Amino acid sequence: MKTPTRITAKREVNVVSSLLVPLQNKNLLVPNVMIAEVVGMQHLQPIGSAPPWALGNVEWRGELIPVISFEIANSQVRGRDTSSARLAIFNTIGNRTRYHFFAVLVQGIPRMMKLTDMEVREDVQASVGEAEKMAVITQLGKAVIPNLDYLDQDIVGKDG
């Protein structure tokens, strides 16, 4: 008599290539497809009567794009920039703004990491601001997932 074959369901593991983006007092965790490029700090062109989170505009690949402070957009205090300050160029999502990209002032070079859903868990003890979707814990420490809808629509979508 033949031994019955056992059918087991395979658990599909989703791996997301992500970037851990250093800010002043925390890290952002984003899928790597959200960031088009990280460039050195450049001279910012001022924006007339801009809100505090709008640091200015910068020319990138022939396009004038807004530069924002994530900390100020999240109602936090922005400290002094480090010597490793850079601009992370984010892709906008959808067609809700007149911009295709916006830049976030960051304090170093993002770190690439591959994560599964099992390697990220919510940090239930942390509070999140308006520009943050969720606080998380990864194998590299704590981070926040930005609220990209908020940044796209409520920040970048405004003309400043």
Image: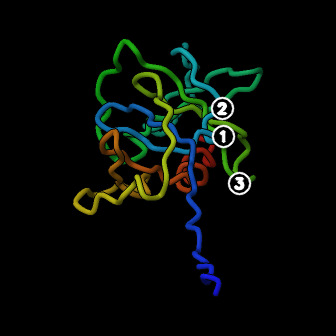
Amino acid type assigned to the residue bearing label 2 in the image: Ala
Which label number is shown at residue 36? 2
Q: CA distance from mark 3 to mark 2?
A: 18 Å
Quarter of the picture holding the C terminus? top right
Across and down, in percent, residue 131 comes to: 44, 52
Label 3: state its secondary structure: loop
Q: Between residue 52 and residue 148, name the one nearer to us.
A: 148
In the picture of the structure, the residue carrying the numbered disc 1 is: 91
Q: CA distance from mark 1 to mark 2?
A: 6 Å
Label 1: how many residues lie within 10 Å, few (<14), some (14-19) or many (20+)?
A: some
Amino acid type assigned to the residue bearing label 3 in the image: Arg
Instruction: Work out which residue is located at the far left of the displayed protein and give it.
Output: 125
Look at 40% across and 52% down and name the residue there: 119
Q: Tell me which colouring the rendered structure shows.
A: rainbow
Count up the numbered dots: 3
Across and down, in percent, residue 127 comes to: 27, 58
Q: Earlier in the sequence, mark 3 or mark 2?
A: 2
Which label number is shown at residue 96? 3
Whether the residues at callouts 1 and 2 have beta carbons within 8 Å, the answer is yes
* Residue 29 visible in rendering: yes
Q: Earlier in the sequence, mark 1 or mark 2?
A: 2
**Relative height, residue 154 to residue 50 (above, below):** below
Across and down, in percent, residue 138 comes to: 36, 47
